[in-house]
Amino acid sequence: MKFLPHNYQKYAINFIADNPVSAIFLDMGLGKTSIALTAINNLLFDRFEASRVLVVAPLRVARDTWPEELAKWEHLSDLRYSVAIGTEKERKAALWENADIHIINRENVKWLVEESGIRWKWDMVIVDELSSFKDHTTKRFRALMKVRPKIKRIVGMTGTPSSNGLICLWAEFRLLDKGERFGPFIGNFRNEYFLPDKRNGQVIFTYRPKPGAEEEIYAKIADITISMKSTDYLQMPELVEAEYPVRLSDTERKRYDELRQDLVLQLSGEEITAANAAVLSNKLSQMANGAVYDDAGGVHHVHDRKLDALEDLIEAANGKPVLVAYWFKHDLERITKRLQKLKIPFSQLDTSSSIQRWNREEFPVGLIHPASAGHGLNLQNGGSTIIWYSMTWSLELYQQTNARLWRQGQKAATVVIHHILTKNTIDERILKALLEKDETQTALIDAVKANLGGA
């Protein structure tokens, strides 16, 4: 296919080529991968300013999206690439290949730097989904920082740079500019731009920006950063968001309230405890979905309200393909059993083959987990409707998952996002936090506190 870039894509391609360090914050659907590959092609073969490129990406994006984009565009046909995933032997073989671009999943960065025994040979690095390096304490961050002095060019790409607040920008830009803009220590960054927010005595859980800090932070990174929203540059399909409420029976409501208020619930003779807000949030979400794990890992049925609602929505789609987003393993198991009972063809979208079959519209229901398929996958050819069976606190995963359908290349005029919500449960608070683009952990704690208080 011939690549005919939009004006914003031309600008981004030139920006990457002209800046040895660049942060590309492009909204979902704007074609970050094709932009990066075109810039790589120019730097390798026109400018001769790069010799070997390493792409670090989420597993499925590394395995599927980058190879698909390389095969898609005519102007990239001269680029030699190798995907280093799989067993250690397979990864080593791929990395030894004489390729222009080596692609590796982010989970293996530490292995590559510290354990593989392969000498570092890449003078340009593309970090696809820079937000996955927002925690400076992770092994992947520390490993990449070890070889950062050997990297002449680095590009960080994401559509959600600060999904958990501005505080996470420090690690992302520490990786990019080696601390030039925000300093080498996160403590100094916090002291300069933030104030303590949620705390328990001397223990500080969250920080809030000082007055004017947001503008100062953006000004600091403006010279190496471009940020664009899809709605500003593309004729996007109409987005329709809808809620499908379900209600618990009196008995089910009593069980939910017991756990919410007492943190301990007896179900089928097994004790279920919630020791802190995060655990309690998970337990309440599970109960809202219809089943809950006990402390031994057993699954206890609570209700089928959401399964019935899912059946209604699939029937209303009248054969039109739908994606169903789930979170807990028992959600997947129960959804699978219901679809099998209804004799509705479906597939879990967790392999290259299943994704290709979805895009060919070979089955009407695709099951997707936001954490494993939220980034980078192109699913818009297979359908235009997504049903959130389970809610997630992660704004980043929520937005990225929705963007698998609501993006450039979507053939339908309208993309529909359904949320199955159990009324008067934590479901409603999660969706409210997402729609308000609140900080994940802060909203979670506040919601659980409100629930514990009986609000």
Image: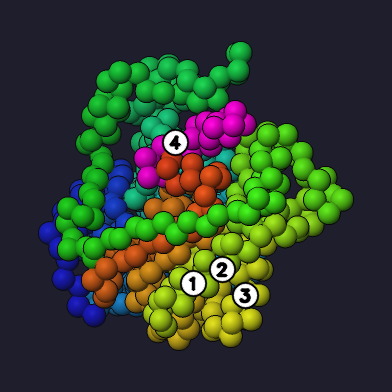
Q: Main secondary structure of the magenta part?
A: helix
> Would residue 366 be counted in the magenta stretch?
no
| The image quarter in which residue 101 lies | bottom left
| Amino acid of disc 1 | Asp
Give the residue pinned by disc 2. Answer: 308
- Residue picked out by circle 1: 312
Residue hosting label 3: 338
Q: Give the magenta-colored segment's residue range.
A: 434-455
Q: Position of residue 152 (x, y in %)?
A: 35, 46
Amino acid at pointer 4: Glu
What residue do we see at 75% from left, 57% from top?
300
Q: Residue at x 59, y 77 (%)?
A: 339
Which structural element holds mark 2?
Answer: helix
User: Which element carries disc 3, helix, strand or loop?
Assistant: helix
Q: Which residue lies at the image location 58% right of the left edge and 85% below the top edge? A: 343
CA separation, marks 3 and 4?
Answer: 34 Å
Instruction: Out of 103 and 277, give the one closest to the viewer.
Output: 277
